[in-house]
Each structure stands twice: as C-alpha cells, then as structure tokens.
Image (cartoon, rainbow, N blue to C red):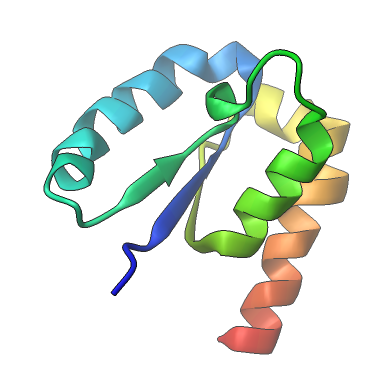
Amino acid sequence: MSKPTVFVSYSRHDREWKDRLVHHLEVLEREGLLDVWDHSRIPVTTDWLPEIEGAITRAKVAVLLVSVDFLRSDFIRNQEVPEFLVRRKANG
C-alpha cells in the first residue's frame, strides 16, 4: 500500500510557515504514513510546471497555507486551487 501524498500549496513569501508545517508532518513521514510534497522538492534545472501538475495529480490531501500573498499569487489562484476544486467536486 502506498502512502498518501500531501501537497502543500503556499506563497514563496510564506516559506517560514510552510517549513513549520512540514517540520510537524515530518514525524508522520518518517513513520512511512505520508509523503509530504512542496515545490522545494523540484530540482533547480527541472521544468517546474509538469512537476507541480504531477504532484497535484498524486496528492490525496492538499494543505493550502492561505495568506494575503497566497491570494495574490496568480499561479495559485488560476492553476493550483481550480485543480483542487475540480478534483474535490469529481472525487468527493
């Protein structure tokens, strides 16, 4: 049985908050219960868009760190959030 992927969506301005969350989730990840994904896992020389799209597709859970900077991000508002809402509506 594969462990569920948790996709963490956040503004780069909120990296400190993302790091705090990931630090807490690391306990479950070390136990083999979760795979926590955020964009820091994308190698520098890699095309980032397919990596993010793939992670969203694999994710069983999405954690959205909502802040003013999150809401100001066109990419998050126009790409990530709509995809999660479509999946929520289709899959429950």
Q: Quadrant of the C terminus?
A: bottom right
- Residue 54, how many percent across, how many down? 69, 53
Q: Residue at x 34, y 67 (%)?
A: 2
- Residue 27, how many percent across, how many down? 14, 38
Eyeballing the image, is 50 above or below 24? below
Q: In which quadrant of the rendered view does residue 42 lie?
A: top right
Q: In which quadrant of the rendered view does residue 9 lie?
A: top right
Eyeballing the image, is 36 above or below 81? above
Determine whether, in the image, residue 92 is placed left or right of residue 72. Answer: left
Comparing 11 with 48, the one in front is 48
Q: Residue at x 53, y 60 (%)?
A: 59
- Residue 13, how many percent across, how many down? 61, 12
Q: Residue at x 63, y 20 (%)?
A: 43
Q: Quadrant of the N terminus?
A: bottom left
- Residue 82, how many percent across, how many down? 79, 60
Determine whether, in the image, residue 39 is placed left or right of residue 25. Answer: right
Determine whether, in the image, residue 81 is placed left or right of residue 20. Answer: right
Q: Residue at x 16, y 40 (%)?
A: 30
Eyeballing the image, is 44 above or below 42? above
Comparing 7 with 18, the one in front is 7
The image shows a total of numbered marks equal to 0
